[in-house]
Image (cartoon, grey):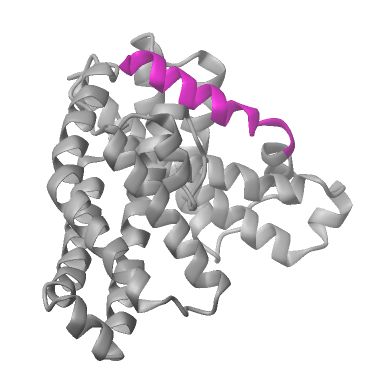
Amino acid sequence: MVDIEFLNEKATKLKKSLSKVKQIIDLGYQQFLKTPMYPDRAQYYALFAYDELDKIACHLLKEIANSKKKEDCVLDLANEGVFSEKLNRTFIDFYNFRKTLFENAFKYPPEKMYPLLKNFVDTLDSLFIKELALLVKELKSKEKKAKYPVNVKKLNEKATVLKSMERKLKTFAKYSLEEFKNSPYFIDRTRYYLVSLSDAANWICRHLSRSMKLKPSKECFKNLMENGVLYPDVAIFFQELSNLRDTLADPKKDVLPELLYKIITEKLSLIDKFIKDIAKAIY
């Protein structure tokens, strides 16, 4: 999903950094060459601008090419060809400029730096925001429309928490029951992760229930099951986990290690099923 708030934030920071470069460039070529601190400051702000551009590029690639990259995305974005030829060329030049800076310990001939930076500023300032807005509009038009007025961004965040807790809990599932029972750390962490798992799942359940305008119920997961959203095995597990949540969170209350071990060795596959059931209901 295209995160417009994120893109706006990064685009604003990009423009701010470019404006700093422009202030120096506007002093003129001769002044740029004669004043040693100007090239240093200009490349400093240019690198800040590049970092913001790279974050934007990674986010766009996630939507365009299902990329999972978190950095070094500018060149890939240029190769996708979703922007104008002039802008793509600028992306490539900007990438090469940054690469050369790092390879040469941030030493770059000022007489070569000036025209490059001027081109970066002029092209990005005049074209990037305009073309980005058009691209985002196109991407948004292709997104699946939710059946209910849900907060998709927040749902995705909670789903990420579920997957994170699943990965962490699987770490303890690799050990035998005896090893698990004899490790206070394993038991403590398992309880903590299960609480986090329950909280994220409960948020999703309540949010979707409200969006679907279902009658409020203390047994949210069973309510979703009765309304055709969750399969019985998924609903029963998450409802039982929800009922156990406060006990898990209270260090003064005992929970059988065997029960915890059973959950992490037999029930974690239900997390994926839960996420898929929710997604299917929404779209």
Q: How many marks?
A: 0
Is residue 200 something that shows in the picture?
A: yes
Q: For residue 258, what is the image quadrant?
A: top right
Q: Report the predominant secondary structure element of the magenta stretch.
A: helix
Q: How far across and how far down the image is residue 24, in percent?
A: 17, 77
User: On the rendered image, what quadrant is the N terminus found in?
Assistant: top left
Q: Is residue 141 left or right of residue 280?
A: left
**Of the pair 31 and 176, the residue shown nearer to us:** 31
Q: Is residue 118 above or below residue 261?
A: below
Q: Is residue 112 left or right of residue 245?
A: left
Q: How far across and how far down the image is residue 168, in percent?
A: 64, 50
Q: For residue 108, what is the image quadrant?
A: bottom left
Q: How far across and how far down the image is residue 40, in percent?
A: 33, 83
Q: Is residue 84 left or right of residue 254?
A: left
Q: Which residue occupies 74% across, 51% down?
A: 172
Q: Is residue 203 magenta?
A: no
Q: Is residue 140 above or below residue 133?
A: above
Residue reaching furthest top? 228
Q: Is residue 280 magenta?
A: yes
**Of the pair 17 and 203, the residue shown nearer to us:** 17
Q: How far across and how far down the image is residue 56, in percent?
A: 32, 47
Q: Which residues are magenta?
A: 265-283
Q: Which residue occupies 81% across, 46% down?
A: 174
**Of the pair 280 and 102, the residue shown nearer to us:** 102
